[in-house]
Image (cartoon, rainbow, N blue to C red):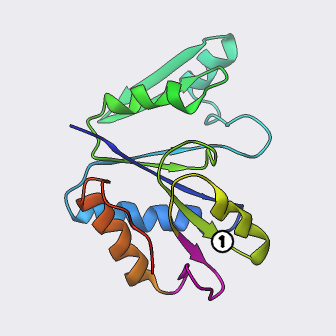
Amino acid sequence: MVMIILQVVGYQNSGKTTLIEKIIKRLYTNGYRVGTLKHHGHSGKVALPKEKDTTRHAEAGAIVCAVEGDGTFLLHAKGSWELDELLPIYERFSLDVLLIEGFKHAPYPKIVCLRSREDEHLLHLKNVLISISWQRKDGSFFIEDEQAYMEHIIAYVKGGGKHVCHRS
């Protein structure tokens, strides 16, 4: 089984997380197994929940710690991770689709979220499938045209990630 990887990139408050939620819901409804990976692009470390045993393990110096319970598995690993080092972890979960938020310069197909004209240079990233803009502009889907861009995204996934998904 091949896992389709699709990135959602853009700057803060461009709608990436909301878009990913919508894509997850639509794919889940269509029977797809979906995973996500978010790049924490802001400065600072990712915070662990306070007052939990796993947090205590990490604070004591554990490089990797995890907790499993009632069908949920949470993993915390210290280090500087490249995307290609993280993908094998996701392959273990037999996903149909992995949605990646961020990692702008990775080589995977991308949906670019454009908040303003200043963001348009992101359209020059490699493997841009579609762009979704907060302003009406040629070549991009308008943020309020949800049905149109979601149909494009779902068609791309249903096609196995193989066909080009450009807006004319």
| Res 63 → quadrant | top right
Magenta-highlighted stretch: main secondary structure?
loop
**Residue at 30% across, 59% down:** 157
**SS type, badge 1:** strand
> Of residues 58 and 97, which is closer to you in this image?
97
Q: In this image, 50 relative to 151: left or right?
A: right
Q: Position of residue 3 (x, y in %)?
A: 31, 41
**Residue at 67% across, 23% down:** 80
Is residue 12 at all visible to an observer of this figure? yes
> Of residues 152 and 27, which is closer to you in this image?
152
Q: What residue type is labelled 1?
A: Leu
Segment colored magenta: 131-144
Is residue 26 at all visible to an observer of this figure? no
Q: Position of residue 39 (x, y in %)?
A: 62, 43
For residue 109, above or below residue 106: below
Quadrant, the N terminus:
top left
Q: In this image, 160 relative to 79: left or right?
A: left
> Of residues 78 and 39, which is closer to you in this image?
39
Q: Where is residue 86 in the image (x, y as percent from the top left)?
A: 49, 29
Task: Give yes or no for residue 99 being in the magenta stretch.
Answer: no
> Of residues 129 and 12, which is closer to you in this image?
129
**Residue at 66% across, 71% down:** 114
Q: In this image, 161 relative to 16: left or right?
A: left
For residue 92, above or below residue 29: above
Q: Position of residue 88 (x, y in %)?
A: 40, 26
**Residue at 55% across, 81% down:** 143
Query: For the image shown, how many numbered marks are present on the structure?
Result: 1
Task: Give yes or no for residue 137 being in the magenta stretch.
Answer: yes
Quadrant, the C terminus:
bottom left
The residue under label 1 is 114
